[in-house]
Amino acid sequence: MADPTFRGPKQLLKAFQWTIQGFKSAYQVEASFRLEVWLFIVLLPVAIWLAQTPAQLFVLIATGLLLLLVELINSAIEAVVDLVVGTKQHPLAGRAKDVGSAAVFLALCIYGLAWLLVIYTRFFV
């Protein structure tokens, strides 16, 4: 958590360390995040080869990063719900997790659609 006594470069370094800690934590704990990271890594060279314009490459990279972003947010939601609810069942906890999962699904659809459009323009237009 941010310490108000830190200022300038020292604060920036601390923020960067917390960011890296967040990535490591998500990668270690969340199987879906690991899978999506590897999907992004594997598809990145394919995107570089496939894209015909810088804009297409940007869209493929941006939608992949969007998927990772939404997965991180979903993981944070799930962690907070698990912390608060624990082993108990609660309809709002289930709803929060379901909505987070739906957001990941939409991001995955956007990523897939971007790939389909770039593939279509590369091979069929």
Image: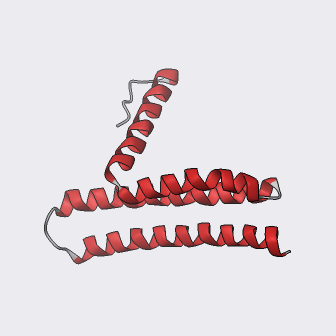
User: In x, y percent, where is residue 13?
Assistant: 47, 26
Depth check: give the residue in front, 95 or 65: 65
* Numbered-mark total: 0
51 vs 6, nearest the viewer: 51
Q: Which quadrant of the rendered structure holds the N terminus?
A: top left
List x then y, in percent, for residue 64.
59, 58
44 lies left or right of 93: right
Q: Locate residue 51, reporting x and y percent.
A: 77, 58
Q: Residue at x 48, y 72 (%)?
A: 105
Can you name the residue that lies furthest to the left here?
Answer: 88
User: Which residue does the image show at 74% across and 67% down from the upper left?
Assistant: 118
Q: Residue at x 38, y 34 (%)?
A: 2
On the image, the x and y values in percent for residue 47 come to 69, 56
Determine which quarter of the picture holds residue 87. Answer: bottom left
Locate residue 31 relative to residue 118 in the image: left or right: left
| 41 sits left or right of 75 in the view | right
Q: Quadrant of residue 111?
A: bottom right
Colour mode?
A: secondary structure
Q: Is residue 79 above or below residue 98?
A: above
Q: Quadrant of the C terminus?
A: bottom right
